[in-house]
Each structure stands twice: as structure tokens, then as C-alpha cells.
Amino acid sequence: MTKPFASSADLAAKEQTLEVLADGVYALTAEGDPNVGAIEGEDFLVCFEALATPVAAREWLARLREHTDKPVKFLVLSHYHAVRVLGASAFGAEVIVAHDNTRMLIAERGEQDWASEYARMPRLFKDPDSIPGLTWPTLTFSDTLTIDLGGGRGDLILRYQGRGHTEGDLVAWLPEQRIVFAGDLVESQAALYTGDAFHREWATTTLDRIAELEAETLVGGRGVVARGAKEVDAAIAQTRNFLDVMLDEVGRVKDKGGTLRDAFEATHTALEPRYGRWPIFEHCLPFDVSRLWDELDGIERPRIWTTERDQEVWKQLQS
Ligand SMILES: [Zn+2]
């Protein structure tokens, strides 16, 4: 028996919840679908993540417009993945911000990633024909970029924390409110996608830098908002544990001369009790283990996922 490919059979709509995290700070969560956010400046908005299509993004903007009619000046993209960037045209943003490496990755593999993610998660691509093309950042940075929100609202600090979920993830940090939008570097009660990841760096220094912020509210890439230091720590710990278990299991199988399939089965067995019921666990794990196998083989940068390679790995591991 082959399981339906990735999330191709997941067609049930998820309930979206708009939460006001502080004055002028918003998050939209969706039961494990990609989260998005917005931060009000004095007379403008910063939006965080763009969803998969302009039609999906316009639904989010309609919800946001119940709270504020300020124009979107900045659209911040946490990383290059299609389901977070291809809705960008709906925002009419003056500036589209991302990390330097995100621009490089869009140029290098944006087309293939679009095709791959569309086949893996078709439900997220509402009206796929509304996508005008790849999304290109208009402002990139290497380490830190600070946006002055004006009007006594403080700063929004975009920080690169090292390689993790991809080669170019950023987090958006509000030091006064102690709120962090972590993108896919941290998941709160959702499984991890690590198919484009740098597991060893992510599990150590990258997550350490996020923990050092001592955020009191954390919006992860998927899953619920973590509120209070205890929940924030738990979200970071569950993310780190997922990676550590993968590193242990895949490393052990490799040391014993086992196969990729053995590594997948060992990792699945080890993670399933804690993470198996969380969103996208079964979908992600074949791609996750495949990438970690490469990483431990010394393949420095993730191989590009194509629709063909997706199907091959799925058949090899999930059948
Ligand atoms: Zn991602």
C-alpha cells in the first residue's frame, strides 16, 4: 500500500484564527497550515509571509482590514518556500524584504520549488492561476535589518540566525513587546519540514540564538501561538528534539551500514509517538530523512527537489 503522496489527499479546509498579540501586532494561525502576521507602524503596515497565492493572501488581508486600513509598506518573507512567498503580489507592498540567501535560492531553485510544493500541497494553492510568477525580494540583507515603526511603536528587527530550515531564514523580533515571528525555524505543535535544512546547525547555534531572545510570545511557521516563556521554551524544545532524534536515528543507521529505508523506518518509529498526530508529519518525514542522509554523507547544500525526485523518494520510503 502506498500512502497518498505528501499532502495531496489533505483537502479539508482549516479554520483560520486571527489573534491580536499586542497593540497593532497580529497573527493568523490555521490549524497547522502556514501562519502569517502583520505589525502596524505609525502610518504603514509590515506584513510577515505572503501565503501560496494572491487569492489566498487577499482572504488574509480582508481579515486584517477589519483592524487596520494602513497601507502595506514592507512585506517580509521568512524564507523562499513557495507556500510563503507566491501570494506576494496581493499586498501591493512598497518593499519586499528577505535574506540575501533567499534571493539566491529563488534564482537557483524557485521554479522547481513552486512545482514541487504545488504537487505536495495543492489545497494551499487557492486559484493557482492568480500567481503572476516568482516573487523577487527588492531589499535583502546579510545579518540584521531594523525597521523603525515610528510613532513610539519601537523597532521591528529582522535577524538572520544562521542556517536552519533553509539557507536563508530570518526571524522578525519586536524587542519591546518581546514577540518573535520565527518562520519555519520553530514549529509549535506541528511537525518539521527539513527537506532543505542544515540539521546540525539548526539544532544547535541557530535555535540557541532564537532562545537567547527570551521571547514571551512566539509565532512559529505552523501551529498555535506560544504564549508565555514556558510555551515559547516548549516550542523551541520540541523543534530541537525533533532534529536531535532525527540526527540520532539516521546517524546510528548510517554507522551500522544500513539503508536510507532503514533510516526512515527507525526515525519514524522514534518520532511517531510524540509527533505522529501533528500536522504534516507523514508528509514531511520521507523528504526530511532523505535530506539528512545527504547531509551526513557530506553533501553540503540540499539537492533541489523536483516533482520527479519527490515521487521517487515517496515511493521508496512511504510504500
Ligand atoms: Zn518552509
Image (tube, rainbow, N blue to C red):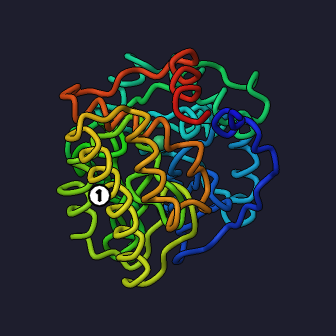
For image coordinates 26% across by 55% down, the residue present is 203
| Residue 171 x %, y % | 35, 54
Q: Quadrant of residue 97?
A: top left
Q: What is the number of callouts on the image?
A: 1
Q: Is residue 120 visible?
A: yes
Locate the C terminus by quadrant.
Answer: top right
Three-letter amino acid code at the position of disc 1: Asp
The residue closer to the viewer here, 186 or 46, is 186
Which residue position holds label 1?
Answer: 244
Q: State left or right for residue 307 relative to residue 216.
A: right
Residue 234 against residue 236 in the figure, above or below: below
Helix, strand or loop for disc 1 = helix
Q: State left or right for residue 129 relative to residue 188.
A: right
Residue 221 against residue 10 in the figure, above or below: below
Q: Is residue 54 visible?
A: no
Residue 35 against residue 261 in the figure, above or below: below
For image coordinates 26% across by 60% down, the residue present is 207
For image coordinates 63% across by 72% down, the residue present is 19
| Residue 285 x %, y % | 49, 44
Tell me if the residue at label 1 has its CB under 8 Å from ligand 1. no
For image coordinates 28% across by 50% down, the residue present is 247
The residue closer to the viewer here, 198 or 51, is 198
Label 1 packing within 10 angstroms: few (<14), some (14-19), many (20+): some
| Residue 85 x %, y % | 54, 35
Locate the N terminus by quadrant.
Answer: top right
| Residue 232 x %, y % | 40, 75
Q: Quadrant of residue 70?
A: bottom right
